[in-house]
Image (cartoon, rainbow, N blue to C red):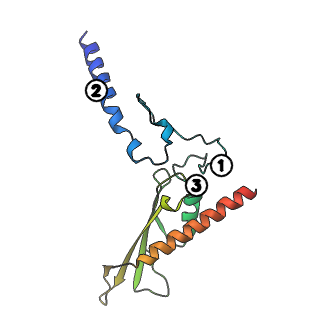
Amino acid sequence: MFDRKIAIALLSAALITLPACSTRGGDSAAPAAEESSGFRLLPSLPNPLRRGNDIDVEGIGVNSYLWRASLDTISFMPLSEVDPFGGVIITDWYANPDMTTERFKLTVYILDTRLRADALAVNVFRQVREENGTWIDAQASTDTAYEIENAILTRARQLRISQLDD
């Protein structure tokens, strides 16, 4: 009898706390029609078989065109961390062989499953080398992140158009 009371208490606690774990608040890709009362253990997933969506059925959690375009665009930089489910690409430091006194590091965030300009964010970190050889943080131009974002978006559109032509 005691084990049954514990099991019921644990189940009740789980049913009360699980809705708080939902990602509904920040999920801009979820259709408004799903806003209904009730309890869901698992979030609704988009239908990958529906025509016209930008979701890759191979299992990554972000827009496949933005993902591939990001990897293509920054392919000259060494990668440090890659998370296709969370949509994060972090590069290691890269120094242009012609400018060895500065180096850059990027973090690319893919924020949505749709191919949209606001589904992409790039952070650029810059360091410069002092005369004694140590690296110090320096301000990166805001135009640099903007140009990288535009290059990724252009490449993503090219990938989508080429797939539509097939």
Q: Is residue 86 above or below residue 1?
A: below
How dense is the environment of label 2, judged by Cα within 10 Å: few (below 14), some, or many (20 and up)?
Answer: few
Give the percent coordinates (x, y) of residue 19: 35, 34
Give the percent coordinates (x, y) of residue 137: 31, 78
Task: Give the residue at the far top of this rendering.
Answer: 1
Quote the CA–CA distance across marks 1 and 2.
Answer: 41 Å
Q: Amino acid at mark 1?
A: Gly
How dense is the environment of label 3, judged by Cα within 10 Å: few (below 14), some, or many (20 and up)?
Answer: many
Q: Is residue 75 above or below residue 116?
A: below
Q: Residue at x 44, y 46 (%)?
A: 27
The answer to whether one can see residue 44 in this image is no
Q: Nearer the viewer, residue 57 or 28?
A: 28
The answer to whether one can see residue 134 in this image is yes
Q: Nearer the viewer, residue 143 or 99?
A: 143
Residue 41 lies in quadrant = top left
Q: Is residue 6 above or below residue 42?
A: above
Foreground mark, 3 or 1, reads 1
Q: Residue at x 30, y 32 (%)?
A: 17
Give the percent coordinates (x, y) of residue 133: 32, 85
Determine which residue is flagged by label 1.
Answer: 52
Determine which residue is flagged by label 3.
Answer: 64
Of the two numbered discs 1 and 2 on the same chain, state the one appearing first in sequence.
2
Task: Give the residue at the far right of this rendering.
Answer: 166
Q: Amino acid at mark 2?
A: Ala
Q: Residue at x 29, y 88 (%)?
A: 132
Tell me whether the residue at label 3 lies in contact with that at label 2, contact meaning CB atoms closer than 8 angstroms. Answer: no
Of the two numbered discs 3 and 2 on the same chain, state the one appearing first in sequence.
2
Q: Secondary structure at mark 3?
A: helix
Label at residue 13: 2
